[in-house]
Image (cartoon, coloured by chain):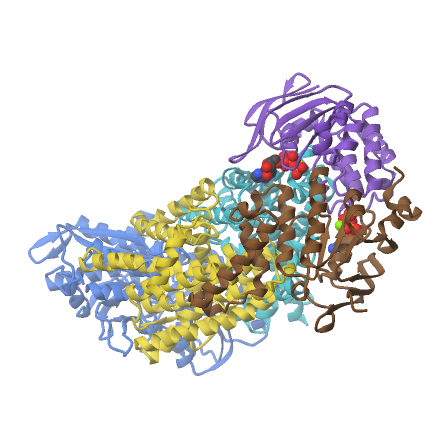
Amino acid sequence: MQTFGQQLVNGLSLGSIYALLALGYTMVYGIIKLINFAHGDIYMLGAFWGYYSLRAFHFNFLMALCSAMVVCAVLGVVIEYFAYRPLRHSPRITALITAIGVSFLLENGMSALVGANARSFPQALPVVTYHWLGIRVSNIQLLILITACLLMALLELIIKRTKMGKAMRAVSVDPEAAQLVGINLNHTISFTFALGSAMAGAAGVLIGLYYNSIDPLMGMTPGIKAFVAAVIGGIGSVPGASLGGFIIGILETGVQAVGLSAYKDAVVYFVLIVILLVMPAGIFGHNRREKV
Amino acid sequence: MLTVKDLAVNYGAIQAVKGVSFEVHRGEIVTLIGANGAGKSTLLKTISGLMRPKAGQITYLERPLDRLSAPQIVRAGISQVPEGRHIFPGLSVQENLQMGAFGQRDRAVFNETLQTVYDYFPILKKRRTQDAATLSGGEQQMLAMGRALMAHPQLMLLDEPSMGLAPIFIQEIFTIIQAINQAGTTVLLIEQNARQALKIADRGYVLASGQVKLSGSGAALLANPDVQRAYLGG
Amino acid sequence: KSSSNQGNNPGKTIKIGVNMELSGSAAGYGEQQKQGIQLAVKKINKNGGIQVGKTKKKVQLVIRDNKTTNNTAASVAAQLVNNDKVVAVVGPATTNAGTAAIPNMTKASVPTVSPSATDPDFTLQKGGAVQKYVFRACYQNDFQGSSAAKFVTKNLKAKRVAILTDNSSDYGTGLTKAFKKSYTGKLVSSQTFQEGDKDFNAILTSLKHKQIDAIYAPGYYSEIGLIVKQARQAGIQAPIVGSDGMADAKLAQIAGKQNANQVYYTTPFSTKAAASNPVASKFMSAYQDKYGSTAPTFSALAYDSVYMIKKAIENEGSANSVKIANGLAKLKNFKGTTGTITIDKKHNAEKTIAIEQLTNGQVTKTYDVDQ
Amino acid sequence: MLFGFIIIDALEFAGLINTFIENMLVTIGINVILAVGLNLIIGFAGQFSLGHAGFMAIGAYATGIMTQTMSTPLGFYISMVVGMVIAVIAAVIVGVPTLRLRGDYLAIATMGAAEIIRIVINNLKITNGAAGLFNIPALASWVTVYVLMCLTTIVTVNFIHSRGGRAVMAVREDELAAGAMGINTTRWKLAAFVFGAATAAIGGSLHAAYIQTIAPGDFNIMASIAILIIVVLGGVGSITGTFVAAVVLGALDTILQNFGTVRMIIYSLALILIMIFKPAGLLGTWEFSFRRWLTKGAVTHD
Amino acid sequence: MTSRLLDAQELVKSFGGLTAVANVSVHFDRNELVGLIGPNGAGKTTLFNLLTGETPLTSGSISLYTDQGVQTLNGKKPAQIAQAGISRTFQNIRLFKDLSVLDNVKIAMTNHYQEGFLTSVFRLPKFYQTEAAMAQAAHELLKIFDLTAVADQPARNLPYGTQRRLEIVRALATKPSLLFLDEPAAGMNPEETADLTQLIRQIQRDFHITVVLIEHDMSLVMNVVERLYVLEHGGLLASGTPDEIQRDPAVIKAYLGGA
Ligand SMILES: Nc1ncnc2c1ncn2[C@@H]1O[C@H](COP(=O)(O)OP(=O)(O)OP(=O)(O)O)[C@@H](O)[C@H]1O
Ligand SMILES: Nc1ncnc2c1ncn2[C@@H]1O[C@H](COP(=O)(O)OP(=O)(O)OP(=O)(O)O)[C@@H](O)[C@H]1O
Ligand SMILES: [Mg+2]
Ligand SMILES: [Mg+2]
């Protein structure tokens, strides 16, 4: 029972990381139907920004977190402007390849710039471990979980309640009509990228802090997993992305807990396929069957 | 109010509009009729800023429009009801109408306009919380018009509002267009249903393969034998 | 048809190729090796080069990236031997890329020394005969794995061991296989992880209540560092024993000094022993000067690889590639940074193995394992 | 094609082609085989598959394992056929459920399926786990690769220009309308998918027998993406484009070997720029005057 | 009843809470021209979708009378129903836009010209024979509809009206005994509509098939059909000859309007 509780905590912390990343994926995909392959690498850059801002500029943790969000937001906007905007009217698969190119560029650019080696992240917050019924929870795990939930709620609020959020929804369903009611397409898409990339930046710093190890390739695997999470949850849906993240986190934890660690990813993909077969648009996605 | 001069528009290599000129005066209903593929929709899209002209000028209230983006043009007072309705599925009827007033900041004005729209289209009020995707074709058409009205346009561009509608709806739509016009909005109307359109129009232009072939008052065009043969079914 | 069996000959300079993982998943390790290679060549050239017969010739490096993929490694090998006409190659770092390079090296009769390909069969042909042009500077897995098993049994007196393997390369799986072969105690659990994994909490939690005397975790420092950290944070105090892939100062940084306790690893390159090894201590300080950090094992192994080639040239008095291969095969008691190396019949590097212990992130003790 | 073969062979005899160039040509040839198959699935059938490397792995391991004991050319071809058969079975198992999905959902599902294949290979004894297989007998030469490249391309192009190809393209254009025309859309989607998988297995077999080393890591997501890049860069729906892109990328990759550590940076920049300036791929959907090409193809075959 | 072609009994279709088709029974005889009208959202297209298998039935039964006897269509896939001899066009044109006009027609003939996989992949002589036969049949159809000149053009290049015509040709190429047309005149001007009226009559006469059409353009409907069904709110409001329907007060109130 204790072990079970502990594993649940493990699963939730891992899940909240996937969720945080999946949020950005789901937003960008929701609006321009682009699998933003570079999203995981923006998260990597967020982690590196945290690393340097803590070490070189001696920021405190909160400042590092917020500045990483800002830097990544700007970066997301810049990437969108140069790499994706010119392709807005091209086949989507073209933009996907460009996204892959951007991802390669960020990974290898960072490797060339700072070296491909893993490095340890400055411990900006002292680790405090709480014990509760024999379950250990660290303050950083709580921080990640709470941040993930807060950001998710905030996003949902932005999308559902604010004007920009409504504009985002309008652009995602019909960009042309959105322009006809006075929505600026470019601003809206830039805003989405900024928001999604800021999430990734926050995730980067939090994960740097949590695992204490960052490297230029760190975004690759979590990036793909986060996309899978977003798909499981129903891509385009904010609660779906979070749910998907938690499902994957708990699933991976569960599989390892029963001793099948070698098949951890295989199980995740298997569950992905099964979920898609039952719900072809993910858990929260609406499967709008084409009306003839 | 709106002057289009020697306008030419291309889709890649295809020339869809080849030097079209016409005018719309304040308070009028002007209709453009013409066969399929004549370039009518392309023309409207160019006026509303969705497409860029290859040559020619568009001036609106003495201002050139061809440099403005689509959202800026909406703010300048032109709103379009696009071909095929293009309502926002997934958003409720009321949210769709809110989107129509996207550039609008004043809450009171907004409420007032919303009331007007609901007065024109009482059915929309009944369905205001419903997902717009589940509306019937006629209701969607009304929603599209309502949404365009929410922007408080001075000039409204309508692209085939009667397409695919039941006869009873068609009559209603034309009645509403007249009402909107009476309330002070200038209307540029594109129609396949030329007879109805010319009946309510002050003036009309006939477009064929990207060029203006004929123009005149609604009544004159209705009486024109060429128009009768080609566009009114004999 | 164009390749001769005479091998390549040097020109004005001695060209040494580097077929290395500079991008892709093993880029981190490849980069460290590149640093070691460059350091070695710089030093050799500063001293005038390599003595070939009567003249001294400078060394010229041709560095090429194999992207950590097999077909690029093969292609890079072909380019190095055919176009660049190198007389010897250092690399690749991984067994997979290394074996992919072998056919082209053999075709051109140019030797290759891998600093870190550990698979026992790496240097062997299918029937078990030795690959004439393939050498390595590191241990092979069997040696290191069995040493770890002995240490765990004898020194740690561990009766119940859990294994945590890096399952994404031959390195971790090979060591595990070797460990399992010679460990006689009880294997409580055998789990795996992937390169790049960051979260080991689930596995560790499942181990927690299993009364484990030691954990054997062969892998690289980037993951093992996290395992150490998360294990200690989860309250697992059992000793963690690993392999030379974690012999890197970064391990303690990633794990956190307070967590890096009771951590052991097998290594040829003992930083502690380095004090008594003049070659090693010189290398250590040179590395510190150039890169501002403690030299990692991979750099040391790569450094040795270059010097092994140098030694072979000097012994043979020729920088013809076939001769270099002969020289490498006959290398005996070569004093390297990672110990005194003798190349055996199977082209493995025989050298003593040490086990280092970390306490609060510092190497506090070195054990010798006798074979 | 025959012509190209003669030229390249002549060059080889003349000593102009060394192992290095041959290596490049073989890589290009194998990539053509893989990308032509994927282009059939993506470009012609309109099914976005991201799992091509999984089927390639099956072919590669079939050859890697079987030629350990049957190290003769005959053994190699038998292993290739066995690989194709297994790949076909796997493609049916994967395809029947997942091909109901659309667009990116299908992509992610096929990617997952390929990863499952890879992970299973990574954990099996017979495949030697993560260490992979090496010392695989060198049973594929440049000639083998070239002939098989021509053969698979001809067969694929013939398929595209037959009733099946039209059915498959109808599914791509409008699945619903295709169904209403009496075309069993599931069956034809599956046909294209299985066909592509079988050619991927051929590519895998050749890869194993030429490089002589295989490991599960060779067939990961990035490997699938690399093939996808060739297809998109050449032009989705253009077999000629696939050829051109495979050659361009193969040459680029080789040239970039001279750039040491920055090779991947240049490569990724090139990728982004080509896509931005040539969004439909190098050749769009243009095909090299294939009437003539086809007759020529038929001649070489008959 | 020898001339009966299709019998649909008590069809029901609900989408979640909404009943789009509620207990509708219709039948079509051989060589008939039937119209289906009703307000927007009445369930006309949905009814077509049910009859062609595009949308699964909630309940009801559909029987097709063929030379081999009665065949139930319940639960059949669209492709199977098409193979059984029912073809259709779509409310929004759904041609294979990037393919040539000829290929559009050939695709519809897929099931009538079998060529084996190996035959086509290895280009055995039979392949060339089959292809030639198919091409000839396709060209004959195109000729009837005056499309020979554009046979090699991609479908997307055709003007709207021509695309609609091609959609009808494509549907005919499957050799149906029953053809459903969903708003064939939508977006056409009166002149084009008049041409279409002619065309529909011609098809029905020359191909000896049953045509059922949905249309809002009364000039077309009242001119060609022999019989009409009127739907409203998913239910059958009326049925009868055009004259009867035009005078039916309920239909006038719900659909035709006063004018
Ligand atoms: N996206 C496009 N790409 C290429 N050509 C196009 C595109 N849209 C329209 N066209 C072509 O431009 C011409 C004009 O089209 P447009 O839609 O303006 O005609 P229209 O008069 O509105 O016709 P309709 O009555 O069918 O609405 C046509 O020949 C059409 O084929
Ligand atoms: N796939 C679907 N999911 C949910 N509701 C649907 C679906 N298809 C149709 N409906 C609903 O069923 C009702 C009937 O639609 P249908 O398309 O059959 O109308 P119609 O009679 O063809 O109208 P129109 O003349 O406008 O084409 C409408 O209210 C529509 O919104
Ligand atoms: Mg139009
Ligand atoms: Mg309908």
Chain given the colour brown: E
| Residue E246 point in image, percent of width and height | 88, 46
Query: Residue reaching furthest front?
Result: E206
Left or right: E57 as drawn, with respect to D122 = right
Colour chain B appears in:
purple
Q: Nearer the viewer, residue D298 or D176?
A: D298
Vertical relation: D36 (above or below) B126: below
Vertical relation: E86 (above or below) C239: above
User: Residue E219 is drawn in which quadrant?
Assistant: top right
Q: Nearer the viewer, residue A44 or B123?
A: B123
| Residue A290 point in image, percent of width and height | 68, 53
Chain given the colour blue: C
Q: Nearer the viewer, residue D228 or C210?
A: D228
Colour chain A appears in:
cyan
Q: Nearer the viewer, residue D258 or A198?
A: D258
Residue D287, can we see it? Answer: yes
Residue A288, can we see it? Answer: no
Colour chain D appears in:
yellow
Left or right: D208 as drawn, with respect to A151 = left
| Residue ID at (45%, 53%) | D231
